[in-house]
Amino acid sequence: MSAAGESGRAQQKQMRARAADLEQAAERAMDPQERQRLMDKARELKEQSERAGGTGQPDIDPM
């Protein structure tokens, strides 16, 4: 596995963890607007993590 692949997976894991933290904060938020803002940010991080993951296939050198 390449160092870039490991780094990307670590970054994805951090984004997913941050998204989970934001979702928990949203559940505790009393203000509906703040709750929605936190949930939106969590969703954006999850989507960004999925995009960063690409197809989920390992990097293969075609040569």
Image: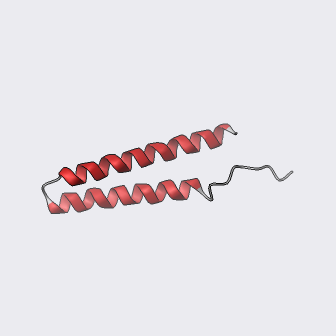
Q: How is the image coloured?
A: secondary structure
Give residue 58's position: percent from left, percent from top.
69, 50
Q: Residue lying furthest right in this view? A: 63
30 sits to left or right of 23: left
Whole-percent x, y for residue 23 in the image: 30, 53
Q: Is residue 37 above or below residue 17?
A: below
Q: Residue at x 46, y 60 (%)?
A: 47
State the count of labels.
0
Residue 46: image quadrant is: bottom left
Q: Identify the residue shown where x is 41% and y is 55%.
A: 45
* Quadrant (top left, top right, bottom left, bottom right) of the N terminus: top right
Which residue lies at the image location 53% right of the left edge and 40% below the top edge? 10
Q: Outermost residue, left direction?
A: 30
Classify residue 49 as left or right of residue 8.
Answer: left
Horizontal side, residue 23 vs residue 14: left or right = left
Residue 44: horizontal and vertical position, in percent? 40, 59
Q: Find residue 9 and report its horizontal and vertical position in percent.
A: 56, 44
Q: Is residue 28 above or below residue 51?
A: above
Residue drawn at point x = 32 percent, y = 46 percent: 21
